[in-house]
Image: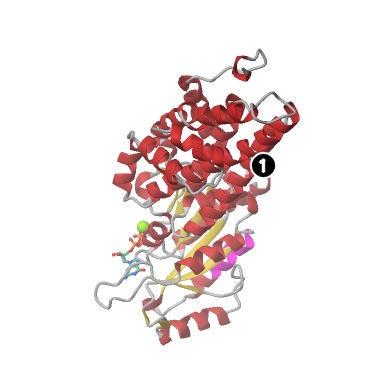
Amino acid sequence: MASDSSAKVPDLDQAQVETMFEQKLAEAFAALGTFNLAVFGKTGVGKSTLVNAIFGRDVARTGVGQSVTKGLIYYRHPDGFLGLYDSEGFETGTSGNAILEGLRKLVSDHGQRAIAERIHAIWYLVRWADRRFEQAQEGFVRALHNLGLPVMIVMTQVPTRDGQVHPEALEFATYIESLGLPLAPDGRVVITNALVDAFTSSPVFGLQKLLDDTYGVVPVAAERALTAAQVLDLGRKKKAVAGIINQAVALAAGIGATPIPFADAALLVPNQVTMIARITAAYGLPPSKTRALAIAGSVVLTGGATMAGRYAVTSLLKFVPGGAIAGSAISATVASALTKAVGMAWARVCEYAMGLTPKRRDAFLASSEVTEKFVGFLKAGNSTSGIVKVAKRALT
Ligand SMILES: Nc1nc2c(ncn2[C@@H]2O[C@H](COP(=O)(O)OP(=O)(O)OP(=O)(O)O)[C@@H](O)[C@H]2O)c(=O)[nH]1
Ligand SMILES: [Mg+2]
């Protein structure tokens, strides 16, 4: 029997795969890099509220703060892929000058810094109800631009009705735009409301536009971190994940196509572990909570899917005349189908986690429920591959 062949790659036990998972998860998170955002605007304009609405976390409260200069603190979120320069209690004038001085030092060696240590975007917030944009503010925005940083002006707490922006807010935005400031990405002011107004019930507005515009100014190398960090646009995460799954499927097909006696399950495992780790990171799930993910992944990969897959391959091989070449052709199909099924099921686990409140999510990510969900989604997947069907039956 093929499974007794001396060429057989030894099976990996669960502990080995678990260790592999932890290593690959760490690598995948490190590979995301960091997206660094600086947020300016007077006290109460809504800096913290806006950051919360787009990144789903109070970076300033949960992050580790480090004073850059008076009035400017850099918070690195413990998840690693989000950094925030927050100007709490910011005023233009003297404190604005101090901040500019600090920034000037910070960006003076920008070119020599790793991408993850640069500032990638600046949001300068103006509250519409202030209806004033002073010369000092204008000067501050120009100075930021002169430092080579992409500045966006965001108007906050703007009321809308039936999708129509309050006419006075529009007028105010037009006024700011008429100053000819070098605004990224297109010279326009981004109009937002980050919180439903309890009194007027004016809805949340403009956040997707703000995020899209932000993508327009960040360097490609910081995009993956931004996609992981933001929680507003699940579509962007899904797109990144689809790319990761496709890559792994192509790699699996390559592994399966090598003329080995049969597609050895153990050969497919590292590729699937890497894929799962990258999917987890792309969704931006907290790396500090990945222990249960590593366990779930290793249980499923060593227990069910791949074992069943190999069983199916070896039994099919018996019926294929002509030996290794026909066998390897089947192996490529098997390897791809299984890898795809595993990737899709894992993506659903991550999306399920994303849909929970932060507290429920943490509890879920620390529990054996992860394994149950993974197996459940794998079984429920709609792969038409016969091999995947056999693998599903083997999952109990
Ligand atoms: N309706 C509505 N209220 C908002 C919005 N943004 C902020 N607020 C409210 O305005 C107040 C101040 O918001 P913060 O986000 O704390 O302002 P900040 O700019 O971080 O202020 P500092 O940290 O003091 O500089 C809070 O009571 C928020 O609830 C918004 O978009 N819409
Ligand atoms: Mg704040």
Foreground residue, 132 or 368?
368
Quarter of the figure that contains the C terminus: top left
Tell me: residue 261, above or below residue 374.
Answer: above
**Main SS class of the magenta portion in the image:** helix
Foreground residue, 348 or 32?
348
Residue at 38%, 46% in the rendered image: 353
Residue at 58%, 45% in the rendered image: 245
Residue 165 seen anywhere in this rendered image of the structure: yes
Foreground residue, 275 or 259?
259
Residue 102 seen anywhere in this rendered image of the structure: no
Q: Report if residue 142 lies within the magenta region.
A: yes
Q: Report if residue 266 lies within the magenta region.
A: no
Q: Describe the element under mark 1 as helix, strand or loop.
A: helix
* Residue at the limit of the structure toward the left, as seen here: 199
Residue 177, given in percent of the width and then of the height, sits at 55, 79
Q: Report crowding for label 1: few under 14, some 14 to 19, many 20 or more residues within 10 A (C-alpha).
A: some
Residue 297, given in percent of the width and then of the height, sits at 46, 32
Residue at 49%, 30% in the rendered image: 301
Q: Amino acid at mark 1?
A: Ala
Residue 32, given in percent of the width and then of the height, sits at 56, 43
Q: Quadrant of residue 288?
A: top left
Tell me: residue 288, above or below residue 121.
Answer: above
Left or right of 380 on screen, residue 146 = right
Residue picked out by circle 1: 250
Of the four image quadrants, the one with ligand 2 is bottom left
**How many circles with numbers are drawn on the protein?**
1
Residue at 42%, 41% in the rendered image: 286
Foreground residue, 1 or 28?
1
Quarter of the figure that contains the N terminus: top right
Give the magenta range: 139-147
